[in-house]
Image (cartoon, grey):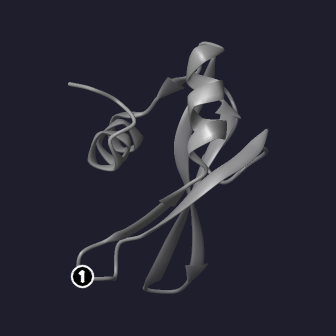
């Protein structure tokens, strides 16, 4: 199954996350298909940048977002409740 999920980047104790399209069987920081955005939880409020057209394209193809990414997409207005 293809999922939209977060993968961790950044250095020790300074997390930065990428929103990626990946096979659900791969490791969290392993191989992915495409990077579709970033999420920086250290900013106040947290900063999320998404490639909206690519996210919508993957959702139409059947990719399932993880719970955290689903929350980020709701905040960005890409998914209705």
Please give the name of the residue rendered at 47% of the width and 77% of the height, measured from the top-left corner: 15
Q: Name the quadrant of the N terminus.
A: top right
Instruction: Describe residue 66's horizontal placement relative to residue 17 as left or right.
Output: left
Tell me if mark 1 has few (under 14), some (14-19) or many (20+) residues whose alpha carbon lies within 10 angstroms of its own: few
Name the image quarter holding residue 11.
bottom right
Q: Is residue 45 visible?
A: yes
Which residue does the numbered mark 1 point to in the structure image?
44
Q: Position of residue 69 (x, y in %)?
A: 41, 42
Q: Is residue 43 above or below residue 35?
A: below
Q: Name the quadrant of the C terminus.
A: top left
Instruction: Describe residue 65's horizontal placement relative to residue 34 as left or right.
Output: left
Please give the name of the residue rendered at 51% of the width and 86% of the height, measured from the top-left corner: 12
Q: Is residue 35 above or below residue 13?
A: above
Q: Is residue 24 visible?
A: no
Q: Position of residue 60 (x, y in %)?
A: 59, 16
Q: Nearer the viewer, residue 79 or 27?
A: 79
Q: Position of residue 42 (x, y in %)?
A: 34, 81
Numbered marks: total: 1
Query: Element under label 1?
Result: loop
Please give the name of the residue rendered at 59% of the width and 13% of the height, measured from the top-left corner: 62
Please give the name of the residue rendered at 24% of the width and 75% of the height, measured from the top-left corner: 45
Q: Nearer the viewer, residue 59 or 5?
A: 59
Q: Is residue 34 above or below residue 60?
A: below
Q: Nearer the viewer, residue 17 or 28?
A: 17
Q: Position of residue 39 (x, y in %)?
A: 46, 64
Q: Is residue 64 above or below residue 14?
A: above
Name the image quarter holding residue 50.
bottom right
């Amino acid at each position: 199954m293809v999922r939209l999920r977060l993968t961790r980047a950044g250095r020790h104790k300074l997390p930065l996350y990428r929103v990626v399209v990946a096979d659900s069987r791969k490791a969290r920081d392993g191989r992915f298909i495409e990077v579709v955005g970033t999420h920086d939880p250290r900013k106040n409020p947290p900063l999320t940048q998404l490639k909206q057209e690519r996210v919508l394209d993957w959702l139409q193809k059947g990719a399932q977002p993880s719970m955290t990414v689903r929350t980020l997409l709701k905040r960005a207005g890409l998914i209705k409740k």
